[in-house]
Image (cartoon, rainbow, N blue to C red):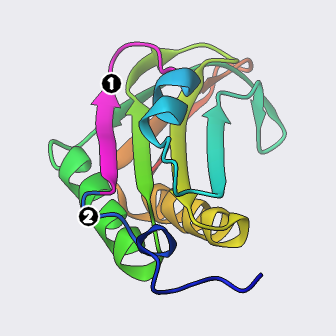
């Protein structure tokens, strides 16, 4: 059956941005997934970024995220762009700041759309643009005693 573009469910929702946030507390995949629930969505894509135990061939012992005061507004700007470019029914994005341990959730984003392909594309655009454009910095401390700052996520 061909999509009916005249049906409201095939188009973006009126207020699709459901959740945007920078948090100092642990993130919840369930919270983000619930935020993007929509009966007109046939596809929901979710991305979870976790703290890994290595980077660039070095063992990571700990890391911390910090952000510019404009980070949440930048996240919203990026979300609005994704909503403008895709038929988003619902969108959510949260990023953690502060000290994190290996395995902790650093970022969770989700997008629901009428169809799976749109959801995958919109979710990928959302996380890629958040990573490259939102002023969030990662401070990594390595097992060998060295450390580095990594810009924008």
Q: Which label lies toward us, 1 or 2? A: 2
Give 151 or 35, whichever is nearer the viewer.
35
Is 45 located above or below residue 21 in the figure?
Answer: below
Judge by depth and name the residue closer to the eye, 79 or 22.
Answer: 79
- Give the labeled residue for mark 1: 23
Disc with the residue nearer the chain's start (1 vs 2): 2
The answer for how far apart the CA atoms under marks 1 and 2 are is 26 Å
Left or right of 144 in this view: 85:
left
Residue at 30% from the left image edge and 36% from the top image edge: 21
Q: Residue at position x 60%, y 13% from top?
A: 101
* Occupied quadrant, residue 84: bottom left
Residue 24 rendering spot, x and y as whole percentages? 33, 18
Quick one: quadrant of the N terminus? Answer: bottom right
* Mark 1 residue element: strand
| Numbered badge on residue 93 | none
Measuring from the top left, give residue 38's x and y in whole percent: 48, 47
Residue designated by label 2: 14
Magenta segment boundaries in residue numbering: 16-28
Query: Is residue 92 positioned above or below 103 on the image?
Result: below
Residue 83 horizontal/vertical position (percent) = 37, 70
Instruction: Give the quarter of the image for residue 42.
Output: bottom right
Residue 83 on the magenta span: no
Compared across the picture, whether 147 is left or right of 116 comes to left
Q: Position of residue 9 (x, y in %)?
A: 47, 67
Q: Residue lying at the far right in this picture: please name it.
A: 57
Q: Residue at x 35, y 55 (%)?
A: 134
Side (left or right) of 69 relative to 77: left
At horizontal 72% and vertical 86% (from top left) the residue drawn is: 2
Where disc 2 sits, the SS reads loop
10 Å crowding of disc 1: few (<14), some (14-19), many (20+): some
């Amino acid at each position: 059956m061909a999509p009916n573009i005249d049906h409201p469910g095939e188009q973006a929702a009126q207020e699709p941005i459901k959740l945007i946030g920078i948090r100092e507390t642990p993130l919840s995949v369930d919270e983000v997934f619930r935020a993007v629930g929509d009966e007109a969505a046939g596809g929901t894509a979710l991305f979870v970024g976790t703290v890994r135990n290595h980077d660039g061939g070095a063992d990571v012992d700990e890391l911390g995220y910090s952000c510019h005061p404009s980070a949440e507004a930048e996240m919203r700007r990026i979300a609005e762009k994704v909503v403008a470019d895709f038929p988003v029914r619902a969108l959510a994005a949260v990023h953690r700041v502060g000290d994190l341990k290996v395995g902790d959730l650093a970022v969770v984003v989700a997008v629901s759309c009428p169809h799976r392909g749109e959801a995958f594309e919109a979710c990928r655009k959302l996380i890629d643009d958040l990573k490259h454009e939102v002023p969030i910095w990662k401070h990594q401390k390595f097992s060998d005693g060295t450390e580095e700052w990594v810009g924008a996520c």
